[in-house]
C-alpha cells in the first residue's frame, strides 16, 4: 500500500548533537514533500517543503531536508539541536500537481536533553 | 493574530450520542480540512471543503459528516460515535487547494468516548 514511513518513533538526543530523522514514501510519480513540527501543546506548523528544483531544502530554525528521488526519501536534518527542538515531527506528502491532500507519516517524537 | 481555532480542546461524549466539533478561521481561506489522528497514528484526511464544495475521502465512514455554513466556520458531526472514534481531530485551512498553498492547522480537539 502507498504510505509515508517514519521509522524512528522516538529519538532522544543531548543538546548540540546532530539530528537526522528518516522519511520514506512509496508513491510513484510526482510528489511534494513536507515536514511539519508540533511543539508540546501547540498546533502543527510547517517546517519546510519541497516541490521542485534544488533537492536540498532549507527551512526555519536551522532545519534542512534532502530529497533523494532514487531512495524515495526526504530526511530531516539539523547540525546542532537545542532543548527547544523537543517536539513531534511529521513528514507528509501530496501527490501530483493538483491536490493539496496531505498524507502524513506517524511522526517522530524528539526529546532533547539539556 | 489570524489563526485557526478549534473548540473545544477536549470533548467527552457517550457511546452513540451525536457530537459536533467546531472549527473557525480568521485567515479567510477558501479551503478547510478535517483530519482524524488516532493514538500513535498519522493524521488522516476525512474530507475537505473547497468553498462550498464538499470533498469526501473514499474511506471516510458514513458516520462522519461536515457542514460549512460560511467561509469562517466548519463543523464535524459524528452521528453515532463508537469507541473507535476516540481520537484527536484536526482542522486545517489553506488559501487554495494547490500544492503551493500551505495548510494552517488548529490545535485540535481530543475526543473521548465513554
Image (tube, rainbow, N blue to C red):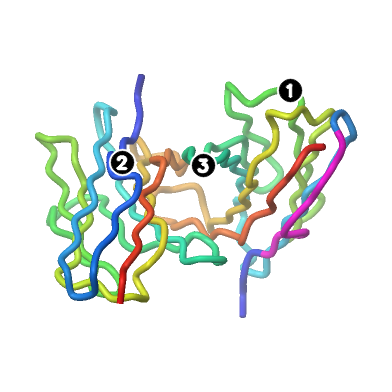
Q: Which of the labelled discs sits on residue B43, or is there none? A: 3
What residue do we see at 62% from left, 75% from top?
B2
Mark 1 falls on what kind of element? Answer: loop
Q: In this rendered view, identify the residue nearer to me: B100 or B17.
A: B17
Which marked residue is nearer to the observer: mark 2 or mark 3?
2
Magenta-highlighted residues: B5-14
Quadrant housing the C terminus of chain B? top right
Disc 2, SS: loop
The Cα–Cα distance between marks 3 and 1, rounded to whole angstroms, is 19 Å
Left or right relative to B29: residue B69: right
A21 displayed left or right of A40: left
Picture coordinates of residue B21, whole percent (x, y): 78, 49
- Is B46 magenta? The answer is no
Secondary structure character of the magenta stretch overall: strand
Disc 1 packing (10 Å; few <14; some 14–19; many ≥20): few
- Which quadrant holds residue B46? top right
Q: Which residue is mark 2?
A: A6
Q: Are marks 2 and 3 in contact (CB under 8 Å)?
A: no
Residue for point 73% across, 45% down? B111
Q: Looking at the image, which residue sits at the far top?
A: A1
Question: Would you name the residue on which mark 1 appears?
Answer: B62
- The quadrant of the image that shows the N terminus of chain B is bottom right
Of all residues, the one furthest to the right in this rendering is B17
Q: Secondary structure at mark 3?
A: loop
First in sequence: mark 3 vs mark 1: 3
* Viewer-side label of 2, 1: 2
Question: Could you tell me which chain the residue with mark 2 belongs to?
Answer: A
Amino acid at each position: 500500500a502507498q504510505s509515508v514511513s517514519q521509522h524512528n518513533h522516538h529519538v532522544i538526543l543531548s543538546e548540540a548533537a546532530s539530528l537526522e530523522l528518516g522519511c520514506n514514501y512509496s508513491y510513484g510519480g510526482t510528489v511534494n514533500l513536507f515536514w511539519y513540527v508540533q511543539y508540546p501543546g501547540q498546533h502543527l506548523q510547517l517546517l519546510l517543503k519541497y516541490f521542485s528544483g534544488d533537492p536540498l531544502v532549507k527551512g526555519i530554525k536551522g532545519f534542512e531536508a534532502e530529497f533523494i528521488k532514487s531512495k524515495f526519501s526526504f530526511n530531516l536534518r539539523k547540525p546542532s539541536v537545542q532543548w527547544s527542538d523537543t517536539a513531534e515531527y511529521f513528514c507528509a506528502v501530496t501527490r501530483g500537481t493538483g491536490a493539496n491532500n496531505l498524507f502524513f507519516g506517524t511522526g517522530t517524537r524528539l526529546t532533547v536533553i539539556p | 493574530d489570524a489563526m485557526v481555532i478549534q473548540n473545544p480542546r477536549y470533548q467527552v461524549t457517550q457511546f452513540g450520542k451525536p457530537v459536533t466539533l467546531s472549527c473557525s478561521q480568521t485567515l479567510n481561506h477558501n479551503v478547510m480540512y478535517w483530519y482524524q489522528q488516532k493514538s500513535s497514528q498519522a493524521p488522516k484526511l476525512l474530507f475537505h471543503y473547497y468553498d462550498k464544495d464538499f470533498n469526501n475521502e473514499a474511506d471516510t465512514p458514513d458516520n462522519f459528516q461536515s457542514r460549512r455554513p460560511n467561509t469562517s466556520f466548519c463543523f464535524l458531526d459524528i452521528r453515532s460515535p463508537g469507541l473507535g472514534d476516540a481520537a484527536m481531530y484536526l482542522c486545517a485551512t489553506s488559501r487554495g487547494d494547490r500544492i503551493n498553498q500551505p495548510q494552517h492547522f488548529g490545535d485540535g480537539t481530543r475526543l473521548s468516548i465513554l
